[in-house]
Amino acid sequence: MIMFWLGRRFALAVAAVLLLVGAGLAAAAEHAAVTIGDFAFKQGTITVKRGTTVTWTNKDDEPHTVVSEADPKLWKSPPLDTDDSFSFTFNEAGTFKYFCSVHPRMRGTVVVE
Amino acid sequence: MSDDTSKPGVSRRRAMSCMMWGSAGVLWTVAGGVPRPFELTGEAQAATTKDFSFAQISDTHIGFKGAVNPEPGATLKEALARAGGAKPAFLVHTGDVSHLSKPEEFDAAAELMKGAGLETYYIPGEHDTIGDDGKLFFERFGRAKGTGGWYSFDQGGVHFVALVNVVGLKAGGMGTLGAEQREWLERDLKHKSASTPIVVLAHMPLWSVYPEWGWGTDDAAPALAYVKRFGSVTVLNGHIHQVIQKVEGHVTLRTAYSTAYAQPAPGQGPGPGPLKVPTEKLRSYLGVRRVELIHGKPAALHDATLEG
């Protein structure tokens, strides 16, 4: 019985620690958003910290893509129809240019510090 | 609405052209005051030349779900009925068959197109090549062997060239043909007589209609240089969901209606998204084209909307 009680208390303590760690990780993972509208990346250049996940959301009535300009390409979204989103996490510092492969005059930049 | 070659610009060109017989075997035409010879190939040409018409449809965007036309399949059916009514020899589809390059969109489009019961020649639009450079599109609709999807064919003495200017688009650019395709075009046309009527198909306009919206092709000029020596050249484009024409010497370039939705006039509004029109007006913005090829005459282009 005592053994059981201890075990239960230990399990609760582990769970509490895990929760705290989880909350800490969530706080560390940064997010940034880019809206696509009127055939443009509305936040044309954004500056983010390493580890940031950038999410692009298409608010146009026309499909768009988000494709890295680097060779080889670092990422390539599927076609994003109206209200579709695509995310990419930037783990390295640098300047990352991208464009819409359907409307290649649409371009944007993510600067990762 | 219907417009044809009786448009002011074209009828003026017609009025200014007259024909006179020159030395044996050479027919001289005077267009815009500049005489130039047509080579005559006599009986050989007569044997392969016959008058015919074909229909152009474009930008069917199967898979589009926007409020302006939630049923592009229904308007495509209407367009095919209209196009087929004039008993064309065949159909050409100048791209954006699908909206998102999805297999199910291509399947639905192929099924609808089959309903027309007409031989159909396709080229892709940029909506047909998203993510896979047109692999799925070419599997279903391609005719090319050993090239990047471009091809040519002959019908009734007319030479047709079907180009691909929507693959490998470069950031910051417009449509592109690329060096390999341009070299192919030069070779393809090299041995054709200057009197062979030429019809060029390409999705994005082969002239800069409105570069700010990407409505053009970066290397159109060097490609068109190869067709300039021909007496009659008709360039049929899609992409901009409206009819705009440019005439350059003997080269007539004209964009086409969509069968799905309209786009704004160049520069009108923030971007080239679907034009919001009342449902009851939609069909006056959609349409098909009939192209008449009558021996010895410039190609006659007749655009008709789905209204009425």
Image: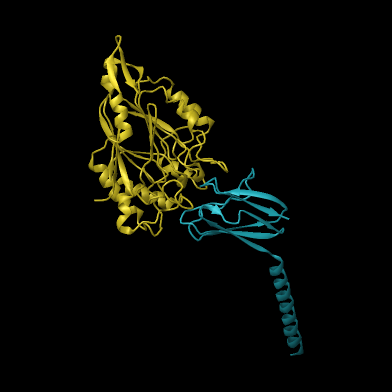
Question: Residue B165: image x %, image y %?
Answer: 48, 38
The residue drawn where x is 72% and y is 84% is A8
Q: Which chain is cyan?
A: A
- Of residue A9 and residue B74, the one placed in the foreground of this image is B74
Figure check: B164 above or below A19? above
- Of residue B110 and residue B11, the one placed in the foreground of this image is B11
What's the image's color scheme? by chain
- Of residue B198 and residue B205, the one placed in the foreground of this image is B205
Question: Residue B130: image x %, image y %?
Answer: 50, 47
Q: Which chain is yellow?
A: B
Figure check: A40 above or below A3? above
**Callout count:** 0
Quadrant (top left/top right/bottom left/bottom right) for the N terminus of chain A: bottom right
Residue B40 visible somewhere in the drawing:
no
Q: Is residue A1 left or right of residue B175?
A: right
Find the residue positioned furthest to the bottom: A1
- Of residue A82 and residue B191, the one placed in the foreground of this image is A82
Question: Residue A71: image x %, image y %?
Answer: 64, 43
Picture quadrant where residue B65 is located? bottom left
Residue B30 visible somewhere in the drawing:
yes
Question: Residue B46: image x %, image y %?
Answer: 26, 20
Figure check: B248 above or below B27? below
Quadrant (top left/top right/bottom left/bottom right) for the C terminus of chain A: bottom right
The residue drawn where x is 30% and y is 23% is B17
Q: Is residue B122 left or right of residue B181?
A: left
